[in-house]
Amino acid sequence: MNKTEVTYFIVFAIIILLCPFFPTRLLLLLDNIVVRVAAILLLLYFVGIGPTVGIFALMAFSLL
């Protein structure tokens, strides 16, 4: 893993661990078609960075 992958790994791990504590109103803002398309584009970007980052991004987005 290079330095950027470690940074993304830590950020997504924090999101995964804290996801159950996010308020419902914040999570309802993510239920929008524009946000879903942006999430898919971000996932494609993260997979380009590295496979581990892509998997953790997918897990973080799916928990949200």
Image (spheres, rainbow, N blue to C red):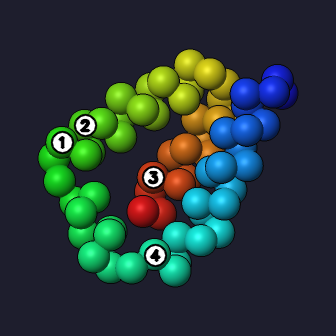
Could you tell which of marks 3 and 4 lies nearer the N-terminus? 4
Relative to 33, residue 43 above or below: above
Q: Residue 37 carries which label?
A: 2
- Residue 1, how many percent across, how many down? 83, 27
From mark 1 to mark 3, how far is it between C-alphas? 14 Å
Instruction: Say few, some or many: other residues with alpha carbon within 10 Å of mark 4 (under 14 / 14 to 19 / 20 or more).
Output: few
**In this figure, what is the number of numbered marks?**
4
Kind of residue at disc 4? Phe
* Disc 4 target residue: 22
* Amino acid at pointer 1: Val
Q: Which of marks 3 and 4 is in front?
A: 4
Would you say 55 lies left or right of 41 here?
A: right
For the point 52% across and 80% down, the residue is: 21
Badges 2 and 1: C-beta atoms under 8 Å apart? yes
The residue shown at (51%, 46%) is: 58
Question: Which type of secondary structure does the marked residue at label 4 adopt?
Answer: loop
Classify mark 2: helix, strand or loop: helix
Nearer-N-terminus badge (2/4): 4
Q: Dividing the picture into quarters, in which one does residue 38 lie?
A: top left
Pointer 3 residue: 61
Hey, what amino acid is under mark 3?
Answer: Phe
Residue located at (58% from left, 60% from top): 15
The residues tagged by marks 3 and 2 sit, at their Cα atoms, a distance apart of 12 Å
